[in-house]
Amino acid sequence: MKSNNFYISSVSITDYKSIQEVEVELDDSLAIIIGPNGAGKSNFLEVLNHIGYNQILFPRGLNNVPRNLSYSVTFKRNSKEKVKEVILSISPTTNLKDKNNEFLSFNVTVIMKSEGEDNKELTFNTSNEEDTQTKLIEIRKEVRPLLNNFVRFIKYNFDYNSVFLSKPQSYIFNKRNETIDAKEKIDGSLFLLRYLNLRYQFSMDDEITDIITSEGTVDENLIIENKIREILLTEFNDTINESVREDFATYSPIKDIRLSKNINVNLNEDNIIISNIIMEFNVNDDWVPWDWLSDGTKRLFYIISEVSLTYGGIILIEEPELGIHPHQLHILMDYIKSKSTNNQFIISTHSPQVLNCLKPNELEKIIISKMSQNGSTFRHLNEVEIKKANVYMKEVGYLSQYWLHSTLEDEND
Amino acid sequence: MTKLKIGLIGEDPNDTNSIQNLLIRKYSEKVYFKKLIRNIKGFYLDNPKTLRSLEIEFEDQKPFFVIVIRDLDGLPEDSAKIGVITNWFDSINKKLNNTGIFLLNIFELEALIFANIDVFNKAYKTKIKQNRNPMYIKEPKEELMRKSRQVNIKKEYEESHAPAIFEKLDLDVLAKNCLYFRQFMDAFEKQLS
């Protein structure tokens, strides 16, 4: 990762679903996790997602911690900034296996390592409320800004039928109070957050503020209606900016996005009602609504929009190949690799084709997961396997064949 | 007039798309392009499976001739690298019935952008100096990324942008400013004539 942002260089996890105890080192740009169904790949990504939104950095309270989970994660960055490394460790201190025990307490340690300075360490147990509050204030002041813009988790089961995408939206403004009729949970999607924010951006436009607060006459209504449409379309183009559009055009069948021009505007004495606000997608030279897109195109839309709107973050992707044509998957992996100069990607996959994006000197990016008697295990390729992978790539065909036809997932001898 | 089918092989779809975009403006009435192998990365270009696929595709698609694009990942003084890559081209050319013409990118494809840098400067609002010899720029892609990032961190040059840039590059300016490209164009014209 070239940006100033932190990436996860290593993580050790204890007691989370199938994971009993694992320690994994991660590449700063890309890690590809392979392994059979039930090996623990998704559980691993869930823990990383949890770490990204952990309760110590973000004030959501301590009750969101999965029961029993303890972890220690090392964040590093390759930049000239002073703070080079942050280590965050959390472990439960009560018997959490008793599900009736609602009181959870944790040992928390945060270590900041800076160049030319002694390490700064903060340790506390959350059962001491006063100490916890003091330490949390300090951590959120010093550590949280470093780890901002953090984890995006692109799951396989995104809600493709979100009303924001599939149904026309309405904005209602009145002269006393604003009301909003959209109440759906948006599942952390950056794109939908932006789309939702369009309403706010639109209402903040100076001309719209004037319109909302002015006493329009019937004769002026047509001019005002057209003006409202024009401003909304312009605000949408600003919200979904050029680089996102370029990414769609380059890496997906969606060549552009726009708001439908058939926006209805109704003005009356008390309210301004703007309805039929819906996005359209240019695919195969036709403008079509969300519902007309194939499931594969919707998934590409989801992945590309989330990646495009993240800069200097950690992006977790569960099985990017789902529903994607093999040629398109090749393009998608090119996209992910090009964005891995500024983000850290951690991907789980069942697709041998995904491995073919790796060069011979990038084999350390593969992580093999497996279920053992001691729960999920995660490991990198050893020297012998790297040598064998190189032979496959040079003399047999592709790296994918090593996975499909050989011993890549077998136990180490 | 029947258009001639020209085969394309390259390290990356961005490379083949870029060269196609560059040539098609001038030659669209005479030729059309067909990629002989899809979705292959440079490091797979010399493995047996790829070479066998290439033979099959060449025989099936019967292009008039084939443009083979490869990066040197070095400068012209690196005669050892040039030797290895020339031998590679000779071996692949046998599979193509000796119809191949070689576009060897000194360092990498992006060096050609430096031969007509105005186009890039305009697109990314950069101020990269003109008149630099594109054959002596080490890691040109890195430089384009760095310079574009300095202007706008969110509009950094990426490999995938190359085809759009090559659409606007001036073929004659490239031939004038880059010896290797000129040699390639001479071979291309000779095959067409």
Image: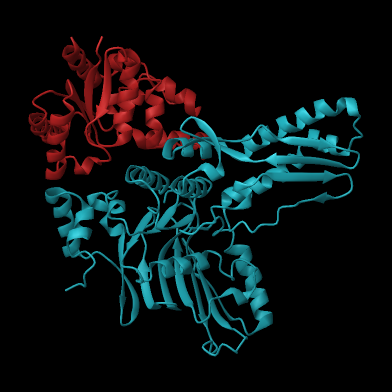
Chain colours: A cyan, B red
- Which residue occupies the foreground of this view, A159 or A44? A159
Residue at 53%, 46% (x, y): give it.
Answer: A309
- Which residue occupies the foreground of this view, A384 or A225? A225
Residue at 16%, 15% (x, y): give it.
Answer: B191
Whether residue A178 appears in this view of the structure is yes
User: Looking at the picture, how far across and down is residue A314, in whole percent?
Assistant: 47, 56
How many labels, in total?
A: 0
On screen, residue A353 versus residue B143, left or right, reads left
Q: In this view, does B64 lie above or below A409?
A: above
Whether residue B81 appears in this view of the structure is no
Q: In this view, does A235 lie above or below B192?
A: below
Residue at 28%, 37% (x, y): give it.
Answer: B12
Q: Which of the 4 quarters of the picture holds residue B33?
A: top left
User: Looking at the picture, how far across and down is residue A376, in whole percent?
Assistant: 35, 75
User: Looking at the picture, how far across and down is residue A175, in whole percent?
Assistant: 88, 44
On screen, residue B89 versus residue A172, left or right, reads left
Identify the image quadrant of the C terminus of chain A.
bottom left
- Which residue occupies the foreground of this view, B146 or B31? B31
Residue at 63%, 35% (x, y): give it.
Answer: A260
